[in-house]
Amino acid sequence: MFDLNFEEDDEVYLDKYFKRIKGFRSKKSFSDGSYERSDGWLSIYISCYDPEHEESYKNALEYFVTHQKEVLDALCNGLLKKYPELMEMYGETGFSDDNFPELKNIEDVKKHLTIHTLHIHEKDDDTFAKIGFECECPWDPEHGTGIVMYKDTFINFGGADTAISGWED
């Protein structure tokens, strides 16, 4: 299903495989303005590409393509659950429209995240790689936020570097 014909730093056209991510991209960006993203492209980076792990990269992407709703709903629900910790990380004690909007449900999360990059990370003990979702968000417009998923399981969240590194709790 998913032809893995790239190694590192390639991009894949969003419309072909990742239709549900469009729900996270149909709004203004929270970027600091230092770059512009196409609404039709999703960057995919494979960290430390190793042909030995290519099957796990492919499996993770195919799983995501096949189970987008479940994965993205789990991502949103995980963020909803961890949102108070995220606010605490930034020293916030209350909601604000500018930085920390109140998030009550999945649709609220979709209104405030813009997924722009998937970071694929090997996972030594399995046949599926982890995926780090790098997103723009209102609480850190300069750096963004990162969420790490394993299939449809929420693993971790933090700054964009969390998605880039694939760091787990």
Image: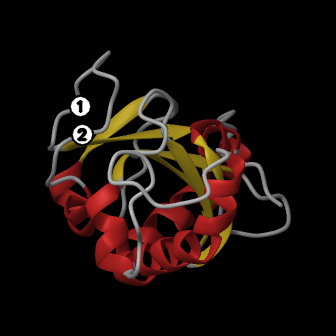
Q: Which residue is mark 2?
A: 29
Relative image position of residue 45 (x, y in whole percent): 50, 37
Q: Amino acid at mark 2?
A: Ser
Q: Which mark is residue 37?
A: 1
- Helix, strand or loop for disc 1: loop
Relative image position of residue 147 (x, y in whole percent): 58, 56
Relative image position of residue 81 (x, y in whole percent): 60, 77
Query: Pointers 1 and 2 in contact (CB under 8 A)?
Result: yes
Q: Which mark is residue 5?
A: none
Q: Residue at x 33, y 31 (%)?
A: 31
Residues under labels 1 and 2: Cα distance? 9 Å
Q: Residues within 10 Å of mark 2 (few under 14, many from 20)?
A: some
Relative image position of residue 49 (x, y in whole percent): 64, 35
Residue 130 visible somewhere in the drawing: yes
Say whether disc 1 or disc 2 marks the residue closer to the N-terminus.
Answer: 2
Report the front residue among 134 and 28: 28
Q: Residue at x 56, y 79 (%)?
A: 152
- Helix, strand or loop for disc 2: loop
In which image quadrant can residue 33 be found?
top left
